[in-house]
Structures are given as C-alpha cells and as structure tokens.
Image (tube, rainbow, N blue to C red):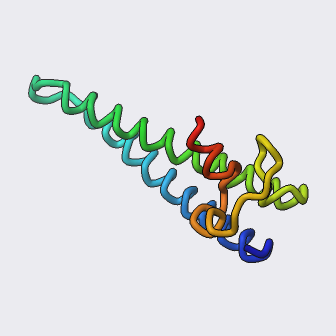
Amino acid sequence: MDHDTARARLNDEKEQLHGLLDETTDAALDDRVGANEPGDMQDSEPSLTLEAQDDAVVEGLRERLAAVERALQRLSDGTYGRSTRSGDVIPEERLEADPAADLTADEALEQ
C-alpha cells in the first residue's frame, strides 16, 4: 500500500475512533449517573455489567487508537510496512486488511 493511501486510511480510522470513544464514554457516563439516581432498589448486577462492558469497549477503542497512532508515527519515521519486531516486510495483503499492522501475520500468531 502506498504511503499516501495508508496515511489517509489511518487518519480516517483515527477520526472514527475518536468519535466512537466520545459516544461510548458519554454512554458510560449516562449509565453510571442513572445507576446512582434514587429510585427502586433493584438488582445492581445489570448496571454493573453494563459498566464493565462500557469500560471494555472504551479500552478496546483506546488500544486500537494507540495502534493507529503508532502506525502514523511509523509512516513519519519511514519504517511503515516493516515488522516492529523483526524488521521483515509486512505483506501488502496484510496492510490492506489492517493498515495499522505492526507485525507479520506469523509474528502476530506467535503472540
């Protein structure tokens, strides 16, 4: 994948991730506020489960955003398209599927 295409795809994903993070964080805050409002004494398990799910989604989005930002940094550094572990070339097909890939497929399977 040429670097201009990779940069455009990564920047688009970065923007989408920021939007999703904002939405998810707002939803999580709403869930927490609603759980603390006075009202019926009900089982708190569903509320706690929703909070845990929100937290997991936010964490996953943050991890992906960090991966995208690292890929953008590799583009700037001139190391994009090479494994951060071995320095081997990451196949074009893998970068097409995941422009933020930082390992070859075999290396990723080893983790």
Given residues 8 and 40, the one toward you in this image is 8
Residue at 33% in and 34% down: 51
Given residues 81 and 44, the one toward you in this image is 81
Residue 85 percent across, percent down from the top left: 77, 41
Whether residue 46 is situated above or below residue 75 in the rendered picture = above
Residue 63 percent across, percent down from the top left: 58, 43
Residue 102 percent across, percent down from the top left: 70, 50
Residue at 50% in and 39% down: 59
The answer to which quarter of the image holds residue 78 is bottom right
Q: Quadrant of the N terminus?
A: bottom right
Question: Would you say residue 96 is visible in this rendering?
Answer: yes
Whether residue 93 is situated above or below residue 74 in the rendered picture = below
The answer to which quarter of the image holds residue 3 is bottom right
Q: Quadrant of the C terminus?
A: top right
Question: Would you say residue 33 is visible in this rendering?
Answer: no
Whether residue 60 is situated above or below residue 68 in the rendered picture = above
Residue 86 percent across, percent down from the top left: 79, 43
